[in-house]
Image (cartoon, helix red, strand yellow):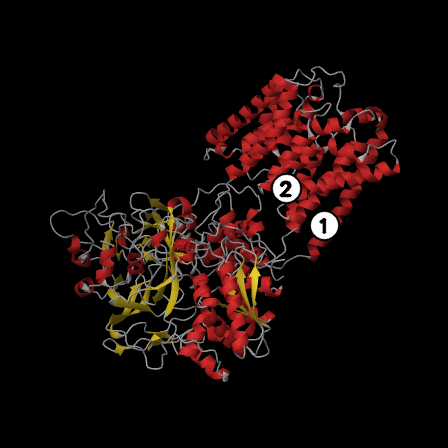
Amino acid sequence: MDKLLVSPSPHLHTKTSTKSLMRDVVIALLPAVVVSVLFYGWSELLILGVSVASCVLLEYVITRYLLKKPCSVGDFSAVVTGLLLALNLPSTTPWWIVFIGAVVAIGVAKMTFGGLGQNLFNPAIVGRVFLLISFPAQMTDWTRPQGFIGGGLDALSGATPLGLAKEGGVAAVEGLDYMDMLFYNIGGSAGELSAIALLIGFVYLLVRKVIRPYITLSILATVAVFSGIFWAIDPTTYTDPLFNLLTGGLLLGSIFMATDYVTSPMSNWGGVIFGVGIGIITMLIRYFGAYPEGVSFAILIMNSVVPLINKVCHAKKYGR
Amino acid sequence: MMKTFSIGGIHPSDSKISKDCKIEVLPVPSKVFISVAQHLGAPATPVVKVGDQVKVGQVIAEPAGFISAYVHSSVSGTVKSVGPRKDLAGNNMTHIEIDVEGDEWIEEADLSDTLITAIPEDNKAILEKIKMCGVVGLGGATFPAHVKLCPPPGKKADCLILNGAECEPYLTSDYRIMLERSKEIVVGAAIMKQVLGGCPAVIGIEENKPEAIKAMTAAVAELQKTAKGYDGISVMTLKKKYPQGGEKQLIDAVMSRQVKSMGLPIDVGAVVQNVATSLAVYEAVQKNIPLITNVLTVTGDCLPMDKQHNYKFRIGMPLSYIAEIAGGVPAEAAKIISGGPMMGKAIANMDATTVKGSSSLLYLTAEQTVRGVESACIRCGKCAEACPMGLEPFLLNKYARNNMMDELEENAIQDCIECGCCLYSCPANIPLLDIIRIAKGDVIRIIRGRVQQGKK
Amino acid sequence: MTTTIIWTIAILTVLGAVLAVVLYFVAEKFKVEEDPRIDEVEKVLPGANCGGCGQAGCRAFAQFCVESSPNLDKCFCPVGGNEGMQKVAAVLGVEVAAKEPQVAVVRCNGTCENRPRTNEYGGYQSCRVKAALYSGDTGCSFGCLGCGDCVNACQFGAISMDPATGLPVVDEEKCTACGACVKSCPKNIIELRNKGRRNMRVFVSCVNKDKGAVARKACKAACIGCGKCAKVCAFDAITVENNVAYIDFTKCKLCKKCVAECPTGAIHAVNFPVIKPKPAAEAPAEPKPAPVAEPVKKEE
């Protein structure tokens, strides 16, 4: 080095980068991805592939040719969006619907707002909700495809546990085993398959300090308390707390989607408010709404409140 | 349960590579250049002319204001010139150039090794000595020590905190003096404690320096047994966390009190002095030796073990001279820092000379120190999590870039201590502190202007 | 069916009428009395809100003009220039004296070639941040830092960085002399100078206060404060203070004697027509039309 480098302090920097954070999220999603591929086979693999590839490609094309900004594909954020979108879809979804979902997620929800860091709503959820409203038949077709292990076309796979509960009340889901839900669910999208796989990812994210636990825990606690109260009042009408915690997209949503940096509050207390809001809205939709599941809607609604929460909730300042 | 400060903080690797290197005394060069800006506040006014003969320890510049300090000659010889010379940052500052002839000290100086434990009774005389010997805080800010030791009327010190945290990575100079000069430091603490009216004194040391904790505890115990005036001094082990050595953080850690915004430590009854300052107080009061030496660490990951050093230097030595004695600047060094890697200054000019507060020559490689390319804020909140003042750097950055002064003040930018935790922890490499530091200056100017208008 | 429509129309009409009355009273109650001339003055201003006049924006300037009328000596809109001020004066019905048109001049010629880099700057690319940190990445602690704060400050796109020299270049056509760049430069290099006769100007392109030898070592094009220019100047326009010369543009007669005298080429003459046979000094105001006036230097 012939010339000395001079810059303002500090002179050391953390090794954590946007890229490494996003890579950690991808790693944390791997258990869920592996489980889903094992049980749902080739068709799930196709969805994952199409979703990730189209998200990355769209981000590249848009940043490079439309916005003419430095290309942001290298930061893995599009990969995360692609994975989350895929895990939120039924494993029978045709590839072109997946592609439309990716266009909405990256093109509409992310890039129109200015790209990474600017979007108000979680791109993967926007993509998923768009598909759910546009293609209701395909998006609720829970036929279980042939997996690499575990049975194949299951007789029970006609609906998700939450769907069963919505239609037939508590009696319809009485026969379901919680251990099944914990390890590989009975029906639902790929990401809802195994609670254990998602929890492994959660622990990894916490250990690597990628996320703080407040949002996830407050969502889960709110859901447990809310459903606990109703269940205690009338166990024949309302499903029990454990059922509500283990089924549907709650774990996937609370661990990976609600904790998205860009669309969640910055402060810890803000995160708690955000989480409680998501928990209550989710349960309101599950118990009283038209849809059997409400995590996606709950997160979207609370996303829109985040700027407000950020304005109100600040960190505790020294000496004040 | 070990104590530490309550908000934020980060854990960089401590990299105390040179901690086992004994303090060596640097030979005096043939020429020194002593800056008149050795301290916080107004630069001192030179009182020697070209051609004057000076001795080691003789006053060569006088304070030019309330917050200013005496500067003494670190060598004996002839004054060659008094004029501008480029400092560390390449800016012009008045330096006094002295040609070295022999090593003749002022007569009052006691150069023996004997430890003097008896503390003089006259507090006024002690303060006068501390002032006349040009003692300044050696923890980094170089604030004149006697000013801090005279609490304004109506304020009383409840606790003297000696800062032995040395939370900056790489630096080992405080650690070495705590090992090698532990008793002198305790005597210095006892002197300051007496001046402050006999409040208890706590020596705070981070847990990653067990030997220093042991040595200081032993020194306190021995002095308490053998001499008078050493009661109420204790050693406190602190958890390792940066910036533990920040004044406000240390008060929070040791006393569980927090200084109000724009307030002074004495408002909550705290006086914080570095252990090196305590040593300088000892030398000044007990030995009549003015502050012309300090200990500096030469270190870096790219230096082999035999080129790591802790040197006792005299002020006015060119940095290039020290680097050469230490074995030259390593080829891998991309940046040389004076001070710690978190708050130290990058050296633009190796011909600059040592000052009272010099604490290191730290060589960092390009891989360690070059900043990544700035990318978009992903609102991860890691900066806010790291900020030890509980500020929200991402927000301040946004407001500062849009010159929103009222919002900046509302969000307490003036409380920023420039510790660097935000920029350190930002995964998107946003130059948070660079921008906040400038805006903080603007906001403080606005606040001061308002206060002054209020007075009128 | 018909009743529904009738009811709807009736309700909306009543609602509209009631709200209109409410709005009228609220507007009356919170009416702010303002001099109507402020609006009129604002209309003739350029509306750039650049702050070059020293006020917070065009509206604030209009108010300032109205308040200080009839004496408009302290009011000057650099963007609108004399013409604009005449309009303002006409609106207010007063007289205003014309001011010399000015232009921003960059007083540093520390190009990459003249002023070799001595270190590398690795912080945020902002002159203010850089200046607060240290003297800069060259041996000269007075010269241009090259991060382009002036470029960002200019609202008229009149300043750009020349990648070859690393120095800002002022586009004289676009420059309105609003002074935003002058304020943004932490080294005080940019100065507003009178445009001069036919845009011809002579100025010292250096602000280095170091002693001659030090300055020269840092930059080949530095003013070394030798004072030769001051000696040769017949009009007392040049002063040398703190080792740096300064040409007073109100006294300079554009004779260019100093330009030839300067040993380091720190004095620049711009926009003078090229005249081959003899030094241009004697003939600054040649009556001959010089249609293609090639600039001698363009380092501004």
Look at the picture and state if B41 lies above or below C289: below
Q: Is residue B4 above or below residue B290?
A: above
Q: Is residue A139 above or below residue B186?
A: above
Residue neighbourhood size for the residue with mark 1, other residues' Cα within 10 Å, grouped as few (<14), some (14–19), many (≥20): few
Find the residue positioned furthest to the left: C277
Quarter-of-image position of residue A175: top right
x and y percent of residue B418 in the render?
49, 57
Please indicate whether residue B340 sits to the left or right of residue A169 in the image: left
Q: Residue at x 60, y 69 (%)?
A: B268
Residue B381: x and y, percent? 58, 46
Residue C226 picture location, percent across and down: 19, 63
Residue shown at the point (45%, 35%) measured from the top left: A70
Instruction: Tell me the subunit letter for badge 1.
Output: C
Report the mark closest to the observer, 2 or 1: 2
Q: Amino acid at mark 1?
A: Leu
Question: Circle 1 is placed at which residue position?
Answer: C23
Name above or below for residue C220 compared with residue B122.
Answer: above
Q: Is residue B139 visible?
A: no
Which of A175 and A59 lies nearest the eye of the viewer?
Answer: A175
Quarter in which the N terminus of chain C is drawn = top right
Q: Which mark is residue C178?
A: none
Q: Nearer the viewer, residue C75 or B72?
A: B72
Q: Which quarter of the figure has residue C182?
A: bottom left
- The residue depicted at 34 percent of the width and 53 percent of the height is B306
Chain letter of disc 2? A
Residue behind mark 2: A264
The reply to whether residue B265 is visible in this rendering is yes
Name the amino acid, label 2: Ser
Tell me where residue A109 appears, x and y as whole percent.
60, 32
